[in-house]
Image (cartoon, helix red, strand yellow):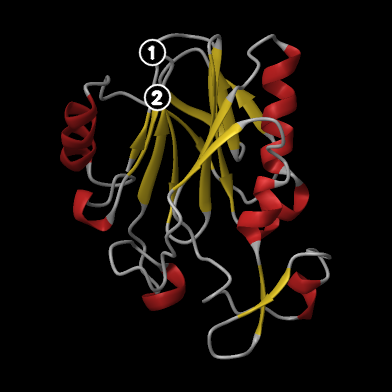
Amino acid sequence: MTCRGAAFSTADNGDLKADGPARRAFSAHLNIPEAWATVRQVHGTDVARVDGQGNAGDADALFTTRRELPLAVFTADCFSVALLGPKGVGIAHAGWRGASGGVVAALRRAMEVVGAIPERACIGPGIRSCCFEVGPEVLARFDGYHAETTWGTPSVDIVSAIRDELTGLDIIEVGRCTRCGGEYFSHRLDGTSERMAGVTWLE
């Protein structure tokens, strides 16, 4: 799925974290450079500003004001959230730890500080409340976002928590669950090590 300046892969695109040819094919399809800027995702809230390709170290969000530099995060149930504006773009890896810690809000603030003010947001696929069974330690981190799985156990609505940090932006949402959607990698479903990509770039 693509929204202007961002794209989210599916399992059909292959393992875009580990498979170089698959990544090149995905880049060619989007007509973007095949060399991406990435981070070493640690399920936190740190944000990296990047100006060149390659790994920018430990963080769970990154942004740039450089044109035609693709930024990517990799997921298999967590959400990738792209923020886009006329002077910069950023993308966050938001699992339950990052989302509850405010990684998306942290990315938005970091971009605003340098004048790269987001105007739009694109939320990729991820595990939704229908399938995200959690224990009390996760419920405690999401007060106000409690939900229930389709089989009647406690869940949380990560998407709503993310959306509430995007107030004032135009939001586009894939709206699909990785665990039951049938077209995505899902670590919760089968323990896969393969990863999809959320990618954004400043046109």
Q: Is residue 11 above or below residue 21?
A: below
- Secondary structure type for disc 2: loop
For residue 63, above or below residue 81: above
SS class of the residue under badge 1?
loop
Seen at 72% across and 17% down, the residue is 112
State the CA–CA distance, disc 2 to disc 1.
Answer: 7 Å
Inspect the image, locate mark 1, and give the three-letter code of the amino acid beneath it: Glu
Where is residue 110 shown, x and y percent of the image? 71, 23
Residue 7, horizontal then vertical, whole percent: 36, 36
Image position of 82 (left or right of 160):
left
Horizontal side of 184 relative to 153 (left or right) equals left
Q: Residue at x 72, y 81 (%)?
A: 135
The part of the image, by quadrant, that contains residue 197 is top left
Q: Quadrant of the C terminus?
A: top left
Label 1 belongs to which residue? 203
Q: Residue under circle 2? A: 5
Amino acid type of the residue that numbered disc 2 sits on in the rendered structure: Gly
**Image-quadrant location for residue 139:** bottom right
Pointers 2 and 1 in contact (CB under 8 A)? yes
Query: Looking at this view, is 54 or 188 the one in front?
Result: 188
Q: Residues within 10 Å of mark 2 (few under 14, many from 20)?
A: many
Residue 200 drawn at (x, y percent): 42, 28
76 is higher (above) or lower (below) than 84: below
Residue ID at (83%, 65%)? 143
